[in-house]
Image (spheres, rainbow, N blue to C red):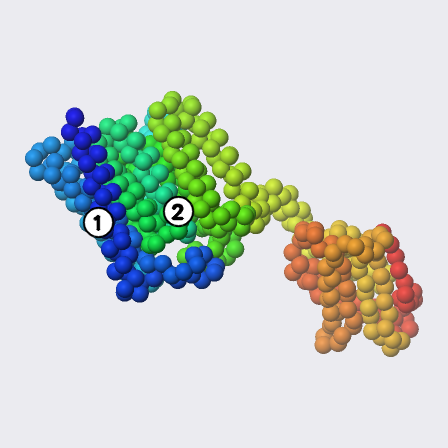
């Protein structure tokens, strides 16, 4: 067993050394080729063009650092169930994802082809043992078999983590540093679970990130690019799958999710925000967590340090869930979820405020809106049955009161000129923001006048305006036309409407 710690340290040192010396070579090559990330003042906030492709240096440092596994296997000393072929399969899949990132850094690959290649790489690993067939319940010692869901959930895990790291790569040192904290957490998890074979892989990735951060921390002279962010997320997904397993197939879901909480949280928020706004899920924006922290007045360096602290905290909680009883784990998961939600609220996302409002008022408002819509549908018949203009107007004021309008005014054109009638809920609210709806009153091509409805702009309309318009068009307007014709012929005895005003 003494060989294992030595091999782990050797893997870490080799990868860190290779990354330290290889990164400036890749940086200078990318600069000569013109493969630069140029600022746009919106999402890319650096001041000057910076070379991409830092992920190439990280990947090759990682691959060489993991070479200790092949060397051990060649002499029959590979621990655990990860053979040389399993390591080679991991390297092949990661190389494919890294190459995809290189292509995206240089020529900009579209989202769907990127997802397809990532899914193929994940499927390749699934077929070679990187899979989860059971998930342990964090609240008990029992495990749940995934059955046929094993394959799609494993692929989603790999693809999701790969892109989650890509999304947080927005500030100098952010993705690489968060990746280092996550790698450290997963390394300790591997040791706790006696998964030394994945511990060596984690050490290699951690060393590569450590050597690269010398050039990537603020002010960065080279960026990870998609070649690095996609690869790091993919590799961490693989380490989490095998390193967090308590047996050959069962994974404790709380531990790896908490270990990778920062990119998972940011990606989840981004997807939810875009769904609420109606934007495309793959449409880039400048509203990630780090952008929000910048708008709150923090400097880029402080934002990175704050998120490092968050990543370290989640990492510690991840390890705590692995070493505690199920009841304690449940409390930790619940408490962490509540604190995380409160923290997200402090970022001031309008989308989440709207979700809260909908959840808080949704059931009450929907019930009231449903009742109002049914009421409006029945009003068409009542309008049509009004015996005179006085009754028609009385029904209209009833509708205005139920729908919480502040004021209505009916202007009718006739042979005697323009006539108007006004109803107000109370004294005019001069200082309040008001919305004014103007509804033309027309029947059979003839303009009878207009109906002007005023309501409080800050109060949500608890009815469907289409129901109101339908009730007016089907009942109110035809009856108004008939009564107006009767009045014009001198057969009706309803009071004249000139300047008449009523109040609630």
Expressed as whole percent of the image width and height from the top left, the position of residue 252 reads 33, 32
Q: Is residue 384 above or below residue 370?
A: below
Q: Is residue 494 above or below residue 223?
A: below
Q: Quadrant of the N terminus?
A: top left
Q: Secondary structure at mark 1?
A: helix
The residue sitting at 48% across, 35% down in the picture is 337
Give the image quarter of residue 456.
Answer: bottom right
Left or right of residue 173, residue 75 in this image: left
Please name the residue that numbered disc 2 is placed on: 174
The residue sitting at 55% across, 47% down in the picture is 296
Expressed as whole percent of the image width and height from the top left, the position of residue 55 reads 28, 52
| Residue in front for this viewpoint, 230 or 283 | 230
| Residue in front for this viewpoint, 217 or 311 | 217
Q: Earlier in the sequence, mark 1 or mark 2?
A: 1
Left or right of residue 484, residue 354 in this image: left
The residue sitting at 58% across, 48% down in the picture is 354
Examine the rendering and report whether any part of residue 218 can be seen.
yes
Please name the residue that numbered disc 1 is placed on: 60
Left or right of residue 67, residue 457 in this image: right
Expressed as whole percent of the image width and height from the top left, the position of residue 361 reads 63, 43
Q: Count of labels shown?
A: 2
The residue sitting at 46% across, 49% down in the picture is 300
| Residue in front for this viewpoint, 178 or 502 | 178
Marks 1/2 in contact by CB < 8 Å: the verdict is: no
Examine the rendering and report whether any part of residue 109 can be seen.
no
Q: Residues within 10 Å of mark 1 (few under 14, many from 20)?
A: some
Left or right of residue 439, residue 335 in this image: left
| Residue in front for this viewpoint, 17 or 340 | 17
């Amino acid at each position: 067993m003494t060989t294992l710690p030595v091999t782990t340290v050797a893997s870490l040192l080799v990868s860190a050394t290779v990354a330290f010396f290889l990164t400036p070579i890749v940086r200078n090559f990318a600069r000569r080729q013109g493969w630069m990330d140029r600022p746009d003042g919106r999402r890319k906030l650096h001041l000057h063009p910076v070379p991409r492709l830092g992920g190439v240096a990280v990947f090759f440092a990682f691959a060489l650092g993991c070479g200790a596994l092949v060397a051990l296997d060649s002499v029959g000393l590979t621990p655990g169930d990860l053979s040389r072929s399993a390591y080679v399969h991991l390297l092949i899949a990661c190389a494919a994802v890294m190459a995809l990132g290189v292509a995206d850094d240089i020529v900009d690959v579209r989202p769907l082809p990127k997802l397809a290649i990532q899914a193929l790489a994940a499927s390749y690993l699934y077929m070679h043992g990187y899979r989860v067939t059971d998930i342990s319940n964090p609240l008990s010692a029992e495990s749940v078999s995934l059955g046929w869901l094993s394959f799609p959930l494993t692929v989603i895990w790999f693809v999701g983590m790969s892109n989650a790291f890509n999304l947080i790569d927005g500030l100098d040192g952010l993705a690489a540093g968060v990746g280092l904290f996550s790698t450290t957490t997963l390394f300790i998890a591997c040791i706790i679970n006696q998964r030394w074979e994945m511990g060596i892989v984690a050490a290699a990735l951690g060393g590569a990130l450590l050597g690269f951060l010398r050039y990537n921390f603020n002010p960065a002279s080279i960026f990870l690019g998609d070649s690095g962010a996609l690869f790091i997320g993919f590799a961490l997904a693989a380490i989490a799958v095998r390193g967090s397993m308590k047996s050959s197939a069962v994974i404790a879901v709380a531990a790896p999710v908490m270990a990778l909480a920062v990119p998972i949280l940011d990606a989840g928020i981004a997807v939810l925000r875009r769904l609420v706004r109606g934007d495309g899920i793959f449409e880039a924006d400048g509203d990630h967590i780090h952008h929000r922290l910048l708008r709150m007045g923090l400097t880029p360096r402080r934002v990175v340090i704050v998120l490092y602290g968050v990543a370290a905290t989640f990492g510690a909680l991840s390890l705590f869930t692995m070493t505690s009883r199920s009841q304690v784990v449940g409390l930790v998961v619940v408490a962490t979820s509540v604190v995380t939600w409160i923290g997200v609220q402090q970022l001031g996302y309008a989308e989440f405020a709207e979700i809260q409002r909908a959840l808080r008022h949704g059931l009450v408002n929907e019930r009231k809106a449903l009742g109002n819509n049914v009421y409006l549908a029945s009003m068409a018949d009542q309008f049509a049955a009004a015996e005179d203009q006085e009754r028609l107007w009385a029904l209209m004021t009833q509708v205005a009161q139920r729908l919480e309008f502040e004021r209505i005014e009916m202007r009718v054109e006739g042979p005697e000129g323009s006539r108007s009638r006004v109803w107000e809920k109370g004294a005019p609210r001069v200082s309040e923001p008001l919305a004014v709806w103007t509804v033309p009153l027309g029947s059979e091509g003839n303009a009878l006048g207009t109906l002007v409805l005023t309501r409080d702009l800050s109060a949500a309309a608890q009815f469907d305006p289409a129901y109101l318009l339908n009730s007016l068009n089907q009942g109110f307007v035809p009856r108004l036309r008939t009564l107006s014709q009767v009045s014009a012929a001198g057969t009706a005895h309803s009071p004249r409407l000139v300047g008449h005003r009523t109040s609630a």
